[in-house]
Structure formats: structure tokens, C-alpha cells
Image: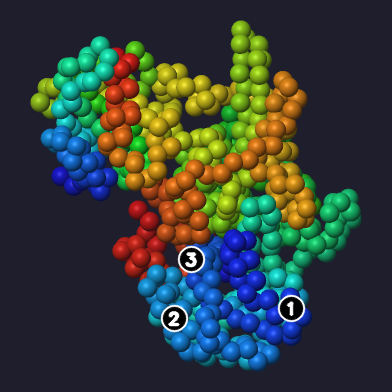
Amino acid sequence: MVMSKDVEKIRAQLEDLGYDTAVRDSGQGMVVEFDYKVETGTKCGDSFRIGISMHKGVYPEYPPHWIHVSPPVSDGLAGGVKPYQTGDGQEWVAMSRPPSDLWDGLPLPKKDMKNYLEGHMRRFWSRI
Amino acid sequence: MNHEVAMTLEVSGAASTHLLQHYVAGDYQEDLCFALWRPSTGSRRSTALVYEILLPRDEERLLHGNASFEPGYFTRAIRRAITDQVGLAFMHSHPGPGWQGMSQCDVEAERDVLAYPSVATGLPLLGLTIGSDGYWSARFWEKIEGEMGRRPCAKVRVVGPDSYRLHFDDEMVPPPRRREVLRRTYDTWGSRAQGDISRLMVGIVGLGSVGSIVAEAMARIGVANITLIDPDGVEEHNLDRLLHATESDVGRPKVELAEREIRSRSTSEDVQIVSFPRSIHDRLAYEAAIDCDVLFSCVDRPVARDILNYIAYAHLIPVIDGGVEVQTLNDYLHSAHWRAHLIGAHRQCMRCNGQYNTSMVVSELDGSLGDPSYIATLPQSERGGNQNVFPFGLSLAGMEVNIMLHYLLALDWWPKIRQQDYHFTLGTILPLDGECRVGCEMSQRLATGDLAVPPYLKQTPGPWEASDVGVEFPVGWKYHLGRLLGKLPWTRD
């Protein structure tokens, strides 16, 4: 599997944060997966398998766009939601939830997974 | 292939302060310096973007009416160029005004002394002369059929935050003769300004309700070179806003309609129109945009705006963008405003002024912005509604064209106009101003030229293959950029 530099960078940043990652090819791009313990919202304390993906070659100037979650959840928004199943039968939902109000305000060295998780992923789960 | 030069007012100012210091003090004394430049390559034009002046240190040049440099100065300059993998420029001053010719002494210095060693940079030597009035002239030196030969430049662009100065070689690009059809136009801003405006290369990206009117304005004021870019065809729901469109035009490419109309209305003696029924997202249209001196961004999508943002900074091509926002409530107009702004060197970019953001770009790239249910989840500010009417588009187009004219015509004492926001319900025009946030990626791309390519640019083949639009570059340029990118020459993906 050939990983682009941005996928490698995301993976490395997540591993630096202590996450054990895997990369799979979704057919529409690479998804970096890891186990995530929810810290906010109604699912606080639960663990999910999370995937992050984005348009090839644009990270970190442009943010990851898709949040993949297994088992699937809903944040109540209908748009940009794609349920799917991986080859091993695992159910997923991919949600298009870019950090539009966060990313461009960060200087380039701070456009990383630490700020993505702290500033965006926490907020994503707080709405569920 | 045309050859040109561009630089920011800041760079031009640093060079001219040094080169003209003796004339300003009343001495009849020329001066010289070296500079660095990067290539900016369009489909029909290659431009040297001068980005840094290497001023001489003590004892590095001699002044004796003419000026000469010590070998150590040249060695220092060419080392920098080779290390930074950029081109070398040699600048000197002349006592007369306007575009400068070259004396035999000038030719020998540039061709015989400087140009051959400069081959080591992989790029041609750029020679520049500044007249006593600050007017730049330029030429390239490179091997042509085994001999070191001169490639003349058609013009030098000096891109300021609040003014735009175009220095033409009148022999290569003669100013138009005054004609009765433009009598009132000449009467308004004079022949010098009309000479600049008519010789501008204007690109219009998006030929919808705003772009079609901008195109009409360019044709009427005598702009002789117009590039039209839009992938869309005329649809029935466009007919209430699209200038000149009739029912029989439905299905026709918008660029074809615009070209037909402005060709018949142009006041230029010899209008040249290039039409691309493609998205600016497509490499061929992108390169055609880089051929322009000024671009109108009449688009409503974030990817197109992002690409134009790149071009404005990396290639020093000012972009005038705008947009209409309408809000309705209970099936009635609640509010409307439209905003126009000029984007470019030392001005706020479109990301920092809130016209779009990178999340919107990736959403469009992934197709989400074509999904109405997705758009419904976005904040109101990011939804980009479709509501508009002809008079609103007309007003915005007028605002955009006038911002361009103000930029071209501005005298030093004129107030700065960077952004304007017209509020329809209040009837107010607010002048806005702002700066890019610290660390903004766009402003860091200033004058980087071909090194800054949007990472998602499409390499779509089509009826205009590169060879068909006259792409031809000196071998050294191809080799050099290929070396920089670590790829085959002129592949960008």
C-alpha cells in the first residue's frame, strides 16, 4: 500500500499522541484509523474506532474532511453522511465535518492532529 | 512565447532607491546592482518575478559616471542564485526617462561578461534598466542556436498594494492610436492611461451574471487582450441575469456567448479574445490565467477562489473578486449586500478576509458541495446561496471594474480602496481593509511563481493540448524547474 506524505504525517502525529494507528484504502482515498475514547457528550467514556481522511496531497494546509466512525453514530445532521461496510463486515459511517471555523486560524506548525483532536474531534462528539 | 518581468512595489522601490540615488542628489551618475528572480510560466507568457535585491557592499562596485562591479560582487550574486536555484538579474540605471535602449557597452557587459556564467543557474540572465523617472525596461540573455542572444521583454509590471504600474516597450507593444470611437474615454483619463488599459491582458474567470458585464466593460473601454474562462453552458435559469443571453443560447458555452458579444462591441482596433470552456481547476485554463496582467474572479466556488488566491500571490497577478449575498425571510427579500475586493501583493488574501476557507475547498473537492443536504448543514455564511438578480450583478460588476480602474489610475494622494461592501437595504458603501493573519500561507507564497502550484490542479487533456497553445520554453528553464521539482520538466502532478 502506497501512502502519500500527508497520510504518513497524520499517522505519525497520531502515534506521537499515543494512538495505535492503521491505514486502509477506502477505494476513495486512504483512511487513517485508530481507537478513540470519547471525552465529551452523551457517548463520553465510550470507545469507537475512528477514521480520518481527506483529499490527497493537501494536508496540513487544508484540513482532514471526513470523520469515519464505527460503530456508526449520528450527529443529527443529514448532509454529508455516507454509511458503508468494510470488507470484514464492520459497519461504518463517514461524515463530512471539516473544521471550518478552526483550521485557517491556526498557523501552519499548529495545523496538526493534536489541535484537530482537541479543537474539532472533542466538539464533534459533544454534539452527539 | 512572450517574455515579461514583474515585481512588487516594495522590491522595485528598494532597487530604484539604490539605482537612482545619485540622480536624486543631482549627480549625473549611473549605478548598478544584482537581484534574484523566479519563473512564472503561463501558456503564452513566461515572466521573471524579481523578489530580492542584492545591494552592493562597500568596494563591490565602482562609480565613474558609468558604473562597474568588482568580480567578487558578481561571484557573490551568482552563488546565491545557484544555491537558491533561482535566476540572476542585473540592474542598472540610465539618465533618461522611459523605456531604455542599450548602448554597446551595456550589451557587452550583459552578454559577454554576465550571461555566459549565468548559464550555471539554469535560467537566463535577466537584464533590467531603470530610467531616471523610475520606468523599467528589461531583456533576457540566453543561448539561441548556440549563440548568446537577447530576448526582448514586452513589459515590466510593478505590483503595489494600492497602485499598479505597467512599463511597456512601445516598439514591441505600440500604444493604440486615438480613435473617435473612444473619444469620451480618452477625454476622461487621457492617452497615457488609455495606452496602459488597452494593452492590459485581462482575464475573466466566470462568465455568469457578473463576469458577462465585466467582459462588456472591458470591451467598451478598449482592452485589446481578453481571456475568458468558464466551464459552464447557458441554462434557462440564467436568462434573467446573463447579459445578452437569449433562449436560443441555452446550451451554448458561456465563454462562446461572451466572446461573440464582446467581439462585436469591442472598441479596440484589434481585439484578441481567448476562450476556455474549462474550469480554472484545469491546468490549461490555470496557465491561461497566468498569461494575464489582471484577473476578475467572477466565480462562486471555493476551489476557483483558492486557485485565484494562489495566482494573485505566487504570480503577482492582481485578482479582483466579489460576491453577492442575499437573505430572504418569509418569501421576501430580507437583506442583500455585495462586496468587491482586490487581492494581491501586500493585500489581504481571500482566506483571511473570509471570502472562503480551506474546509470549503476540501468539501468541494470531495463533491460534498454538490449535495443539497450537505449544504443545508453548513453555517449560513458558508452556504453560498443562489439568489441574485440582474441589477445586483450589474452593481457588483461595476464595483469590481471601478476597483480595477482605481488601482490602475491611482495617483499617490488618492485614498486607498482595498475592499468595498455595498449594503442594499441600508444604501451604504463601507470601505473595508484588513491584513492577512500572521503566518498566512498565501502571503508566504509571494513571488514564488511556478513553485506554488495548487496541489489539486487537474491535468485534464482536451482539445487544447499544451503544444496547441504555444507552450515552448528555453531548455534551461525546463531543466531548472524539473530539477527543482524532482520531476520531468513541466509535469505538475
Residue indicated by mark 3: B39
Q: Residue at x 71, y 76 (%)?
A: B131
Amino acid type indicated by mark 3: Pro
How busy is the neighbourhood of tag 1: few (under 14 within 10 Å), some, or many (20 plus)?
few
- Which one is earlier in the sequence, the residue at label 1 or at label 2? 1
Amino acid type indicated by mark 1: Ala
**In the image, which is nearer the foreground, mark 3 or mark 1?**
1
B76 relative position to B289: left or right = left
A21 relative position to A124: left or right = left
B103 relative position to B48: left or right = right
Element type where label 1 sits in the image: loop
- Which one is earlier in the sequence, the residue at label 3 or at label 2? 3
Labels 1 and 2 within one chain: yes
- Using the image, tell me which numbered label, if any, was put on residue B76: 2
- Using the image, tell me which numbered label, if any, was put on residue B25: 1
- Write down the chain letter for disc 1: B
- Write down the chain letter for disc 2: B
Residue B456: percent from the left, percent from the top?
39, 45
The front one of B266 and A101 is A101
The front one of B9 and B338 is B9
The front one of B278 and A76 is A76
How busy is the neighbourhood of tag 3: few (under 14 within 10 Å), some, or many (20 plus)?
many
Q: Give the residue at the far left of this rendering.
A: A88
Instruction: For marks 3 and 2, give the CA distance.
Output: 21 Å
